[in-house]
Image (cartoon, rainbow, N blue to C red):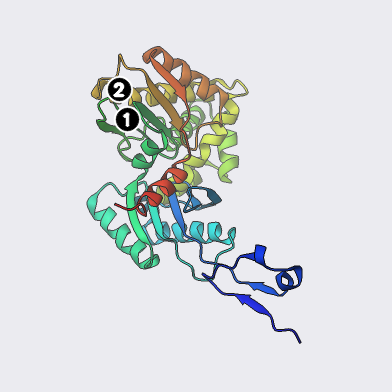
Amino acid sequence: MAQRREVKEGFCLRTRDMNPAQLGRLVVYPTRMQFVLGFDGGGTKTDAVLMDGAGKVLARSQAGPSNPLRVGFGAAIGAVREAAREAMKQVPLQEGEPAAAICVGLAGVGPSESRQKVEALLAAEFPHSRLQICTDLDLALAAAGEGPAIVLLAGTGSFAVGRNAAGETARSGGYGSQIGDEGSAYDIGRRAVLSAMHEKDRTAADSPLGKRLLRELACADWSAVKVRAQAASDEVFPRLFSVVAALADTDDATAQELLHSAAFDLAGIAENLVDRLAMRETRFLLAKTGGMMGRSKFLESRLDERLQSLFPEATLGSLRMTPAEAAARLALKMLAPT
């Protein structure tokens, strides 16, 4: 039996110097591949990007919410772990091969105590990887690219983050559902329920919006809705945005009024930031992002109209890359020689 020649891990063999018979006897073992992981986590979902050492995106994945202040620290780390596993399944890696570096951007890690706890848990989860923790706001601004920019995020919560021509940065909003998050999916859902309940009080009958909300929540009446909302408001209100968005696009007056108000609230968050950073006379990118974008023509048309009237010098657009990809690129920077 002819002896097989093996190419061991890390050993380079010039195949141009071999004849066809020799090539046929090669057994090629996979080499270790340097890769990084980037995560963008919020109150609704966690996005992950796996990138190789050259900056090429090799895999994307998604898991559940990972805002530790909304879902708890254990659930947040679990979502990051699941997103990592799903991304790594898509790439031919050696078993147990760790990421060289990881950048995790999460909503809810602004407070130092929260950030330190998340960092400790992630260090235990990924002990062989360089680790960077940042907020979802940091990622949003990184994803906007270079130069003056305002990023307006509308998802489960709402906030804006910006950078002026001098490189100064600031944020606006993002105070959480108990205080603010005006114009967010949570806020719209809460207002929709309140509007439907007021209509039931006034007419003793459910409005078209009320009927759709009850159906979405699989609740027989508003008493059941109140019980569910008191127990888990984060699971009740944000999901109702889709109901309001769908009805608004079919000319439901109540739904359109809710989204019209939301558009003004969201624009107000951006306006506060533009004034703080003295960007009224500046040309800048105003990028809209978040889970609400692309889901309601009515909302986006009203929001664009309001933003353009407030900031005629701004260019309305999208982020240059996804926040999760921005996180992966930040992870890649950790590997660059100093």
Q: In terms of sequence position, does the residue under pointer 2 or pointer 1 come before the other?
A: 1
- Residue identifier under label 1: 162
Q: Which residue lies furthest to the bottom in this view?
A: 1
Distance from disc 2 to disc 1, alpha carbons, whole Å, reads 8 Å
Q: Which of the 4 image quarters holds residue 214?
A: top right
Could you say whether the residue bearing mark 1 is in a helix, strand or loop? strand
Residue type of the residue flagged with mark 2: Val
* Res. 206 visible in picture: no
Front residue of 333/67: it is 333
* Res. 58 visible in picture: yes
Could you say whether the residue bearing mark 2 is in a helix, strand or loop? helix
For label 1, the crowd category at 10 Å Cα-Cα, with few meaning under 14, some 14 to 19 and many 20 or more, is many
Q: Is residue 120 left or right of 202 when viewed as pictured? A: left
Residue 283 on image: x %, y %: 36, 17
Front residue of 332/38: it is 332
Front residue of 239/93: it is 93
Callout 2–callout 1 Cβ contact below 8 Å: yes
Front residue of 317/93: it is 93
* Residue 274 image label: 2
Residue 330 on image: x %, y %: 38, 47
For label 2, the crowd category at 10 Å Cα-Cα, with few meaning under 14, some 14 to 19 and many 20 or more, is many
Residue located 32% across and 58% down the image: 118
Residue type of the residue flagged with mark 1: Gly
